Amino acid sequence: MINNKVQLITYADRITGQGIDELSNLLIGPLNNVFAGVHLLPFYNPIDGSDAGFDPIDHSEVDSRLGSWDDIKVLGANYDLMADLIVNHVSAQSFQFKDVLAKGKQSEFWDLFLTKDDVFPNGMSEAEQQAIYRPRPGSCFTPITCGDGQTYDFWTTFTDNQIDINVKSTAGIEYLDTVLGKFADNNVNIIRLDAAGYAIKEAGTNCFMLDETFEYLNKLSAQANEAGMETIAEIHSHFQTQVEVAKRVNMVYDFALPPLILHSLFSNDAQALLNWLTISPRNCLTVLDTHDGIGIIDAGPMGDKPGLLDAAQIDNLVETIHEKSEGQSRLATGAAASNVDLYQVNCTYYNALGADDFDYLLARAIQFFAPGIPQVYYGGLFACENDMELLARTNVGRDINRPYLNAQDIDAALAKPVVKGLIKLIQLRNEHPAFNGEFIAKGEGSVCRLSWHDDTSSIELKVDFASREVIIVDHREGEQSIVDLADFLA
């Protein structure tokens, strides 16, 4: 059972400048008693591919620069430990695909990879190609000539260095089974199903979140559960899809929450946020920022489906982020900076709020009071600002929010009032018993009230976005205390 306490999202190397053992030391040192769990972002060989570890050459091997499976096992013995099962693809540099490049269909690994002909054996029409849901611009196929002299259109949903797996083939099933086995043997107890919404492709569909995809998620989740692990689906899509996916797996991400909080802070209107919190999945993880950008599609309309925000509100949200970040996010988003996707804004959450300490702490307070288990990204924990130097060096949009930190950076960040205040909020979320009780959301106009209560205690966050008056009312052991959120910055 996952602890209902705050978790950290981090790379091992980017938070310490070193590896997994050093991360463990950080968690029992300066961050002692702050986090109950860790989402350890890809630690596979290699960590520095074209997509920061999400394009593994060997998904079952720990990058030796970070440590070993023994280090993973130690970390998982002390914390809830989440790892990414990269369901959709493997690196074009993998030994399996290199064998395919050399031998074509004669390779023993041929069936591990998905080609256009696997899905469209009778050819694909222009209409069928246009119907495919795309997370990035351009074609989802990459023509590659193999050693047998034949050119094949391999399915590459994200980049041409990420070759899609044929998850229906025996080879695809065995590949993912091997990785799951490694996780189970080394104290990983939460599996993040990365890019799972794209795993199943069928001719005549949009090849995203199909009925068969739901069945596949059911099967993967059950398999992980049998091995003692829980699953969380990582899917950016319409909010109704998240509600449906939540019924099929142990947990989902509440990706609609981050843009809705920004909208409330920018517009001083709580209604869209309140509407969502009355229907949002309760079996969820909440985030504001991650290693990816700030999701926008999750709160907006899709086709003829209305969103939690309308198109004009989404446009205003995006433009306000660009304005608050003084144009930095615009340089890292959309068609700029070699972006893989077009549905996220690349920016630190702190800079998306204009580096305003109070608004940032308020955003975190809302996250912690919303239903679900909160996760805090390492850049957000230390209130990092956009890393424009790293962005300029790599021209990878997401790197604006993937800084490399060292011990001196962390010491400086821990001295900042906003970081001290955030850690106090985390400890309140971890310690208060009412967060294991019932949730109620109320309010109208610029006011929202988020409360939790059990048989003996309660806690409520009262927010007036217009006046920025924010208090926390805490009832415990027969006593009541009222704290102004501004006091957390004192």
Image: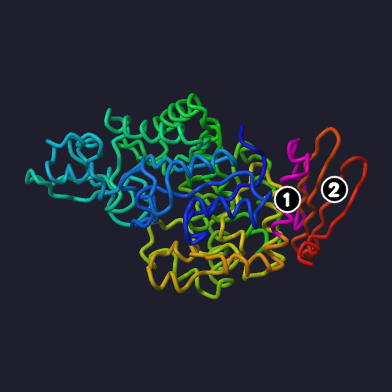
Estimate the x, y position of residue 471 in percent, counting from the top left. 82, 57
Q: Is residue 410 magenta?
A: no
Q: Residues within 10 Å of mark 1 (few under 14, many from 20)?
A: some
Say which quarter of the image contains residue 321.
bottom right
Residue at the limit of the structure toward the left, as seen here: 149
Q: CA distance from mark 2 to mark 1?
A: 14 Å
Q: Residue at x 87, y 44 (%)?
A: 475
Q: Which mark is residue 427?
A: 1
> In the rendered image of this protein, does residue 336 appear above or below residue 263?
below
Q: Which residue is mark 2?
A: 474
Estimate the x, y position of residue 94 in percent, counting from the top left. 26, 46
* Residue range corresponding to the magenta coloring: 422-447
Q: Residue at x 34, y 51 (%)?
A: 158
Q: Along the horizontal axis of the image, is 367 left or right of 237?
A: right
- Whether pointer 2 and pointer 1 mark residues with C-beta atoms closer than 8 Å, the reply is no
For the residue marked with disc 1, what is the amino acid?
Answer: Gln
For the residue marked with disc 2, what is the amino acid?
Answer: Asp
Residue at the limit of the structure toward the right, as seen here: 478
Circle 1: element type: helix
Q: Residue at x 57, y 49 (%)?
A: 256
Mark in the foreground, 2 or 1: 1
Q: Residue at x 49, y 70 (%)?
A: 387
The N terminus: image quadrant: top right
